[in-house]
Amino acid sequence: MIDSPWEYAPAPESREIANLKPSYRMFVDGEFVDGGGEPLKSINPATEELLAEVSSASESDVDTAVRAARRAFDGTWSTMPGRERAKYLFRIARLIQERARELAVLESLDNGKPIKESRDADIPTAAAHFFHHAGWADKLGYAGYGPDPRPLGVAGQVIPWNFPLLMLAWKIAPALACGNTVVLKPAETTPLTALVFAEICQQAGLPPGVVNILPGAGDIGAALVAHPGVDKVAFTGSTEVGKQIQRSVAGSGKKLTLELGGKAANIVFDDAPLDQAVEGIVNGIFFNQGHVCCAGSRLLVQESIADELLEKLRIRVRTLRVGDPLDKNTDVGAINSAEQLGKITELAASGDAEGAERWTSPCPLPEKGFFFSPTVFSGVHQSMRIAREEIFGPVLSVLTFRTPAEAIAKANNTPYGLSAGIWTEKGSRILWAAQQLRAGVVWANTFNRFDPTAPFGGYQESGFGREGGRAGLEAYLDV
Ligand code: NAP
Ligand code: MG
């Protein structure tokens, strides 16, 4: 199986489907307009070619957008009956489904993720978030927050580049369902699907100002969260920026949720079904090039099975195809930016320097673009940077343990606490471990499962507040 002669013929999805335009404009008060900032250039990280110019916001555009959102909140959205708001959310969900292929190809072009992931995970899950929250809009009185919970007002939302449309959906769907209006800043390197989403808002006939999209760099995110007209701040991104935002809104009375970084432990006990665990480990760290906040980036293996598991893992990882994100056979696509590739390279080098043993998949890499081969470090100790810091790339750090108690102690020895995985045949051990693990999500004999009904969020430096499910509504209601 290792040296199988299997070759896959290229199966590229057509980039024509993306309907790429040479330039995109920001979306304020129901119109596409030019921003006052320096235009951004969005590139394809798999080829380094320019995809489109995107007009970006200035600080005064932030003010204009927040005012538009306030007028929409006072004038229509907050007073509209929930059953009417729900219709708009349903329409948006169906339009995402109708334009799913276009959105998937555009997302893969802009972000570098494999088309099979944007097509089968990002876009359908984004639609699912709108469907789920459409169902809540007229039932908020039954959500456990009182008979008539009120919205907060204008939500200022800032999202990262790893799941551009999906993170937008996680933010915008609950905000709108609860009766809030939104100003959202997408990440600098991945603004395109957010602007197609703005077209979808127009198509759905959403009242002007309910959703505003402001492309821009970090300074525009900072201006948005600090704007006095914003009532609620929702941020997904790095712990470092999350801390800055927490400082900036302190004492303002703004409600805040932070979804930050992670360094999840994926724990394999000696009774685990190993082949199944290998699939879960691969999915946990190589899905989306490892650009996943809840990635299973620390593998904790019981010592007695470590050699066998690592051998199986290497055999499996060798079969991952790295390359053209638009090829339907690609498993691992491009790293989103030269900057991120630099961070991954630097942290991996620290693993070498600190004495871990590096194994790299022998897969060929494309000559152009930003790529990093799937990498597994074994012999990792708790003190090493690759065990403590978030790499946010296709790099797995493997540690071992002897007893279940040691596994839990090591898993919890992190400033983060977003997710964790457990692999074992014993149900009692799953329940025991899940209670001990200080992580917002604990997966058992699976990994990276997302569902709009399930709340997602962190402990400690992974942030606070929940997104999704009934618990996620609280972040957008005055309770
Ligand atoms: P980042 O640098 O924190 O950026 C996230 C967003 O914040 C981007 O839109 C960014 O704009 C903006 N931003 C930068 N500086 C800002 C400031 N001072 N004030 C307000 N906004 C600012 O994070 P990243 O490196 O792009 O994303 C990776 C991180 O996100 C990882 O740590 C990952 O774990 C975390 N993440 C967490 C979750 C979760 O749900 N917990 C999900 C996905 C990612 P620019 O694009 O211009 O930089
Ligand atoms: Mg891009």
Image (cartoon, rainbow, N blue to C red):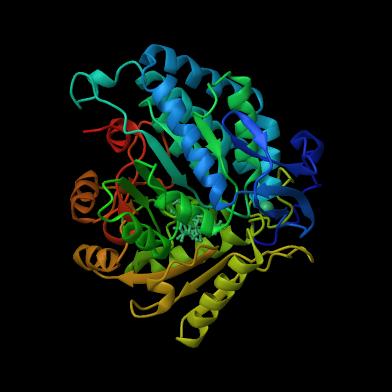
Q: Compared to 478, does 157 lie above or below?
A: below
Query: Going by the image, does 389 lie left or right of 214?
Result: left
Quadrant housing residue 336? bottom right
- Residue 442 shows up from this direction: no
Residue at 50%, 62% (x, y): give it.
392
In this view, the residue in front, 164 or 115, is 164
Q: Compared to 303, does 33 lie above or below?
A: above
In this view, the residue in front, 119 or 242, is 242
Quadrant housing residue 2? bottom right
Which quadrant of the figure contains the N terminus?
bottom right
Residue at 54%, 21% (x, y): give it.
206
Query: Going by the image, does 34 lie left or right of 208?
Result: right
Residue 217 appears at what percent x and percent y? 57, 57
Residue 211 appears at what percent x and percent y? 51, 32
Residue at 23%, 56% (x, y): give it.
437
In this view, the residue in front, 455 or 277, is 455
Q: Compared to 217, does 453 lie above or below?
A: above
Quadrant housing residue 203? top right
Q: Compared to 300, does 210 lie above or below?
A: above
In this view, the residue in front, 359 or 316, is 359
- Residue 302 shows up from this direction: yes
Residue 319 appears at what percent x and percent y? 64, 57
Q: Across the whole image, how many numbered discs are drawn on residues? A: 0
Residue at 58%, 60% (x, y): give it.
317
